[in-house]
Image (spheres, grey):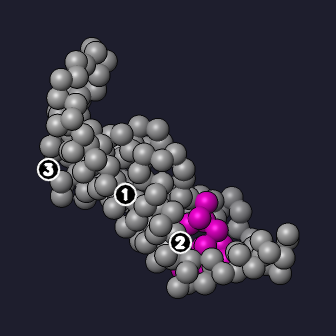
Amino acid sequence: MEAWFASVLQWLALPQFGLSTVFVVALVSATLLPMGSEPAVFGLIKLNPELFWPAILVATAGNALGGAINWWMGFGAKRAYESYKHSSVQAKALAWLERLGPRACFFAFLPIIGDPLATVAGWLKLPFWPCFLWGGLGKFLRYVVMTAGALWIWPGQFQIG
């Protein structure tokens, strides 16, 4: 089992596969599915330190695209949900989002509330490209901080095989 796990890690560490894997994991984790992509980014960078910036950029692109998918899901869901009555808490949250506009999408990197935030931005028909850019900026900064922090905490190289 240990040899199999090591071979899988080596396969995923190959730049041509590792970066595509990071992209897919980051994209899926940005949708409403509950998972994180930081371990995949961290693992690839620990195995290939020279891929720090490519991995950060690929993860950002995948995660931002996942946020865009959420925006479109929200945009489409609004028509199916027009008759919904909002509670006072939901009304306050919607008012906050409408007041901040696309800048609120910067916080789409946050766990639990980030993915629904992008979805609600689409629901409210906030402008797509500003939402995409603000969301991408927040996700980029999250990846830089999380990966740099993990590298600082675990500075040694992983040894495989």
Measuring from the top left, give residue 131's x and y in whole percent: 23, 51
Q: Amino acid at mark 1?
A: Gly
Mark 2 or 3, closer to the camera: 2
**Contact? badges 1 and 3 (CB < 8 Å):** no
Q: Nearer the viewer, residue 69 or 161?
A: 69
Residue at the disc numbered 3: 127
Q: Hey, what amino acid is under mark 3?
A: Pro
The residue depicted at 24 percent of the width and 40 percent of the height is 77
Instruction: Return the residue at label 1.
Output: 66
Is residue 141 depicted above or below 11 in this figure?
Answer: above
Kind of element beneath mark 2: helix
Position of 117 relative to 59 (above/below): above
The magenta segment is 39-52
Q: Is residue 21 above or below residue 81?
A: below
Secondary structure under tag 3 reads loop
Please name the residue shown 51% across and 76% down the image.
Answer: 19
Q: Is residue 118 magenta?
A: no
Task: Report, in whole angstroms, how far the alpha carbon at label 2 lies from the one at label 1.
Answer: 14 Å
Determine whether label 2 and label 1 are within 8 Å by CB: no
Q: Amino acid at mark 2?
A: Thr
Residue that extends furthest to the front in the rendered view of this protein: 80
Residue hosting label 2: 21
Q: Are marks 2 and 3 in contact (CB under 8 Å)?
A: no
From the viewer's perspective, is 74 left or right of 79? right
- Which numbered disc flags the more N-terminal residue, 1 or 3? 1
The answer to if 40 sits in the magenta stretch is yes
The picture places residue 159, in percent across and down from the top left corner, at: 79, 77
Helix, strand or loop status at disc 1: helix
Residue 130 appearing in the image = yes
Q: Give the class, few, some or many, for how many residues have Cα within 10 Å of label 1's Cα (few <14, many ≥20).
A: many
**Which residue is painted at 54% across and 50% down in the image?**
35
